[in-house]
Image: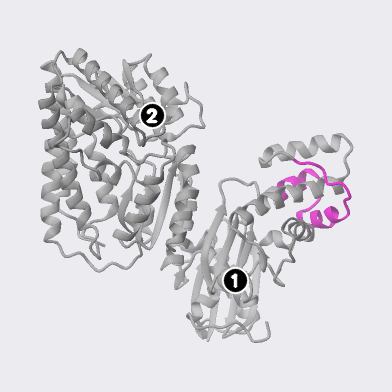
Amino acid sequence: MLSTLQSLDIFKDSYELRIAELKEEREKGIKVVGTFCLYVPDEIIFAAGADRIVLCGGRTDTIPVAEQSLPRNICPLIKSSFGAVVDACCGGNLACSHVPLVDVVVAEATCDGKKKMYEILHDYIPTYVLDLPQKPGSHEALNYFLSELRKFGKFMEDLTGNVVSNNALRREIRSANETKRLLHRLFELRRRDPPPIRGSEVLRVMQKQFFLSPDQFRQGISQLCDEMEHTTPDARTGPRIMISGCPMAAGNTKVPDIIEQKGGVIVVEESCTGTRSFWDLVDEDKDPWKALAERYLEIPCACMTPNDQRVARIVDLAKQYNVQGVVYYTLQFCHAYNIERLRVQRALKKEKIPLLAIESDYGDSDMEQIGIRVDAFLEMIA
Amino acid sequence: MITAGIDAGAATTKVLLLQDREIIGYRIAGTAFDFLTAARNMFDELLASCDIGREEVGKVYATGYGRNAISFADKSISEITAHAKGVLFLFPEVRGIIDVGGQDSKVIVVEDGRVADFLMNDKCAAGTGKFLEVTAKALEVTINDLGGLALASNHPADITSMCTVFAESEVISLRARGITKEDIAAGLITSIAQRVVVMAKRMGLKKRIAFVGGVAKNAGMIATLEKELGVTIYVPFEPQITGALGAAIAAQGEHVTPPIDS
């Protein structure tokens, strides 16, 4: 296998540093916002002088707490996240140490499971919900989203007592774009054959993106890219794989780990923990609110209808990264991504790119079953 | 060259010896708790019965759920690939394979002599041999008698439970209502066949379909599948060995062509 990249150690130690930083900020009266989704623009939070951490849970141990309140047959990400926040609010110690540091949650009206979960979450922690149009692509949808972003800006101003000025927004847009450009550099390097880094390593780094500070994260990515540019990876043996689908929140690396253990080479991820977070930049020259509304409404999430841009993006990425097969990953009971699979599969079939669908939760009980499918898929496309 | 295929399945283990293009012997037995010892003993017995020394066997390939536990095998391959190779060896014209085994069922699409797509159901016992085994017990018949009983039915009972445990209690309540064993057996078989047919249609199987795995020994199941799919189905002389056969073929190298008389 590939030699381990030294720069990855930066990310291993970063969590404790970040916790210390957040505690310090709170002592100074800086508000910490917890979010669950890419549709909530970090730029607005940072422009208001607040900090943010993403609360999406990938761990299985907080799920039983959630199942005391929520139905069992909803996605594990919702249950894990909800369980972590509720446990932390009730003085438990199951959740990671960043969860109790959140002052307020800024949620979003995406899938049904999350929307309804937030209503209950509000009983435990103040939860603001950013609304989204479900059918993007029209002026009306864009104007509505723009008004929602301005309302959200007002909420942040009231929370922090700071003004969200156009200048502060422009500064944060430039900062976030810098992160996005660095991630493009990282992903560009993965187009090489063989790629200089494992997919599971990139996933673990991408998961860190959501609770490190932008500065801390960029520093790590920058060093990682420098090192990768001078690394000669071992010759690869397995087929090039793209993962597409649901986010894999921190703690959840099951499927990529299995794919790599079976000999697949993961070269790109079309997901919230992959390309969706950074692929499109925000226009730095336009009115900052309008530029944010346009960019964020273009995120190709399956909660939108129709979602042709995602299907096109997947086919495009599959070609750009020269993949031999796509593993379509869905969290158990995620209707939006599960249903959208067929359209993705049909589009890929036209390009003669095979797809393997895997629906799974956070438990280990299906590892052998997934392993068999992955083995068979890799044999099929080899 | 003599090669061996070992299919360490969840319910049964199959061992097969192949000399070039000829099957020289095979064995089928229930999978023991100790996969490895059971498979090794079966392999030794098969070698002895065929009067072949271990040193005469070239490569040994393993497949099935326990494939990675078979330490004396040279390599392991997935059962999807193995079944496709085994079935194509027996029926080169086949384009789709339905495999219903002890603890899973799968549908494989074959194009140009190789796997083009597949679908597996192994999350629960519904649509597997286990479903028939458990529900046959509730009828107080063996799984082997279920097919014959079903063929004698004129009005298959409507079994609505997908869950094996619930189906078992459904069988008991149907019996309490005086429904005949024949009609209940037919109902059970229709229920599992319909699940498999949905998988087959999802994969676009239309004709030249082979049916393998332990459940393919059930005449009632074959008849129901043929009715639901509207085609004649290819069933090998021994439907349980196609995985082991495919593994043995893979062990021969990639150059084995099907026998001329098939």
Q: Is residue A91 visible?
A: no
Left or right: A91 in relation to B56: left
Q: Examine the structure image and report whether residue B61 is included in the region drawn in magenta.
A: no
Q: Secondary structure at mark 1?
A: strand
Left or right: A351 in relation to B210: left
2 and 1 marks in contact (CB < 8 Å): no
Q: Residues within 10 Å of mark 1 (few under 14, many from 20)?
A: many
Q: Nearer the viewer, residue B33 or A125?
A: A125
Quadrant location, the C terminus of chain B: bottom right
List the residue tagged with mark 1. B15
Q: Secondary structure at mark 2?
A: loop
Say which quarter of the image contains residue A361.
top left
x 37%, y 45%: residue: A309
| Part of the protein shown in magenta | B132-159
Left or right: A215 in relation to B66: left
Q: x and y percent of residue A145 in the render?
A: 32, 27
Q: Is residue A75 visible?
A: yes
List the residue tagged with mark 2. A133
Left or right: B239 in relation to A175: right
Q: Is residue B262 above or below residue A223?
A: below
Circle 2: residue type: Pro
x 10%, y 42%: residue: A219
Of circles 2 and 1, which is in front? Answer: 2
Q: CA distance from mark 2 to mark 1?
A: 59 Å
Same chain letter for marks 2 and 1 = no
Q: Is residue B206 above or below residue A307?
A: below
